[in-house]
Amino acid sequence: MDPRSLGLVIVILGVLLVVIGSLVAAGAFGWFGRLPGDIRIETGSTRIYIPITTMLLLSLGLSLLAAIFRRFQ
């Protein structure tokens, strides 16, 4: 990969991070972490949270991104 295309990839990733950060700040991902399948146990002063479904979706998304990047390398 030549330096010019590497620079373009870094710029695109930076723009994506800014867009995602703006959406998070605006509350567009309020559902994230509260999906069906996420386990939440609250008893008295104890809170246990196990985000199973959220982590599965996150893993799937990151795996897809990794596969896309591997194809273009």
Image (cartoon, rainbow, N blue to C red):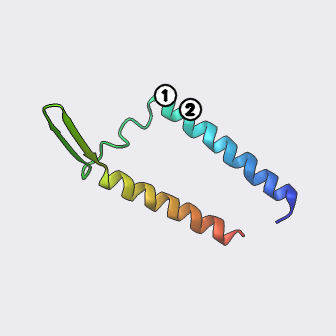
Residue carrying label 1: 26
Q: Quadrant of the C terminus?
A: bottom right
Tell me residue 71's x, y (percent). Answer: 66, 71
Q: Amino acid at mark 2?
A: Ser
Tell me residue 45's x, y (percent). Answer: 17, 31
Residue that protrudes farthest toward the front in the picture: 45
Q: Which structural element holds mark 1? A: helix
Q: Residues within 10 Å of mark 2 (few under 14, many from 20)?
A: few
Tell me residue 69's x, y (percent). Answer: 65, 65
Horizontal relation, residue 59 to residue 10: left or right: left
Which residue appears at 31% of the width and 50% of the height?
A: 51
Residue 67 is marked as: none
Q: Nearer the viewer, residue 41 or 33?
A: 41
Q: Quadrant of the N terminus?
A: bottom right
The image quadrant of residue 20 is top right
Is residue 67 depicted above or below 15 in this figure? Answer: below
Q: Are marks 1 and 2 in contact (CB under 8 Å)?
A: yes
Horizontal relation, residue 25 to residue 35: left or right: right
Q: Nearer the viewer, residue 55 or 65?
A: 55
Which residue appears at 61% of the width and 42% of the height?
A: 17
Which residue appears at 44% of the width and 60% of the height?
A: 59
Is residue 55 depicted above or below 27 in this figure? Answer: below
Rounded to the nearest angstrom, the CA distance separating label 1 from label 2 is: 6 Å
Residue that protrudes farthest toward the top in the picture: 26
Residue carrying label 2: 22
Q: Which structural element holds mark 2? A: helix
